[in-house]
Amino acid sequence: MLKKLLSLCLAVLFLVPVSAETFSYSGGSGRVSIVCDGVESREDGAYAAIRFVSNNHSKTDYRYVRIGEDKYYPDENGQFVIPVVLGENMEIVGMTAKMSSPHEITYTIFVQLEGTDIPGLTFVSAIQADASYLTLSQYANGIIMASIVPPEGFEAAQFRYLLTEDASTIPAGLEKDYGVIPVPAESTVTIADCEALEAPDYKSMIRGKVTVVILDAALLTEENRSAYETLRDRLNTLGIPLLLDRSAQEADSSTWDVLWNIINP
């Protein structure tokens, strides 16, 4: 008993807080979020303390977390301490008894202790800086980050993208904050007039295996906000990123040319 108590005390002492930038996840129905309270270092590796939190503030009822064949059970506060591999996507399975019958839900989590401006990605260098509305940055594993400044009144967070040849190199959960664009793009569609914005041909996009839709920024106005949001949400459901094009509004479009060459060499 004394040895167990000592072990628990040491676990508390070595628990280090984890910021939102160092933990991300994907999976589930969206009704429940996973929160990481901290990471502890032990002789046999790293352990993360996680909780399942209902997005509508109701009580969750997760009975165990399974990693492979090993099961981990919660404490009285609903916290699970599980072994993690730092800097890599890893699959966990949570068993919830909240529904009509207990069942397992699969998630992918990513835990990273090193601070980076994008969680789990290592910055390499900036790529050309001649644009007013576009920033390109190179990250390890061949990942390119594109950040586009939208017209006034629209949220900048909606226009951040990660371009990659291998989507498995993107840490789990980043797809919630960044549009993930596979490159080179198999097929693209450009929306450059109001008719195409208000009545997109989604069936043709699906048949044509479109992997990115490019929207002319001139259409991004308050008058067209509703049509834009409908397009954005529908494409999000289809898993197709919507890329904003402000190249026509640049004095120097050379940085945009770099982006187009990455998307469609």
Image (cartoon, rainbow, N blue to C red):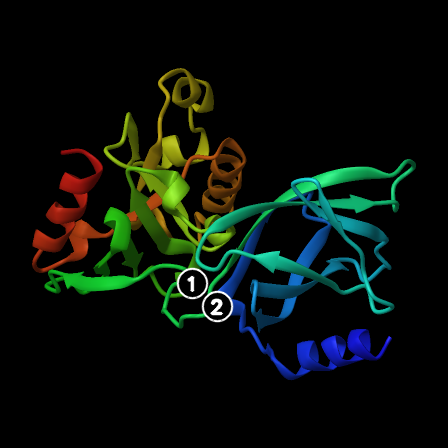
Position of residue 103 in the picture relative to residue 86 (left or right): right
Residue 253: x percent and y percent? 10, 53
Which residue occupies 86% across, 53% down?
61
- Cα separation between marks 1 and 2: 5 Å
Position of residue 161 in the picture relative to residue 175 (left or right): left
Q: Foreground residue, 158 or 33? A: 33
Residue 200: x percent and y percent? 42, 28
> Which amino acid type is marked by label 1?
Pro
Label 2 environment density (alpha carbons within 10 Å; few <14, some 14–19, many ≥20): some
Position of residue 166 in the picture relative to residue 73 (left or right): left
Question: Which of pointers 1 and 2 lies earlier in the amino acid sequence?
Answer: 2
**Is 165 situated above or below 53?**
above
Q: Foreground residue, 146 or 153? A: 146
Label 2: element kind: helix
Quadrant (top left, top right, bottom left, bottom right) of the N terminus? bottom right
Label 1 environment density (alpha carbons within 10 Å; few <14, some 14–19, many ≥20): many
Which of the numbered marks, if any, corresponds to residue 3? none
Which residue occupies 39% across, 62% down?
156
Residue 125: x percent and y percent? 18, 64
Asked if the residue under mark 2 is in contact with the one under mark 1, i.e. CB atoms within 8 Å, the reply is yes
Q: Foreground residue, 141 or 98? A: 141
Quadrant of res 250: bottom left
Which of the numbered marks, if any, corresponds to residue 119? 1
Label 1: element kind: loop
Residue 51: x percent and y percent? 72, 62
Position of residue 137 in the picture relative to residue 169 (left or right): left
Q: Residue furthest toward the right?
A: 100
> Which amino acid type is marked by label 2?
Glu
Which of the numbered marks, if any, corresponds to residue 21? 2
**Is 167 situated above or below 114?**
above
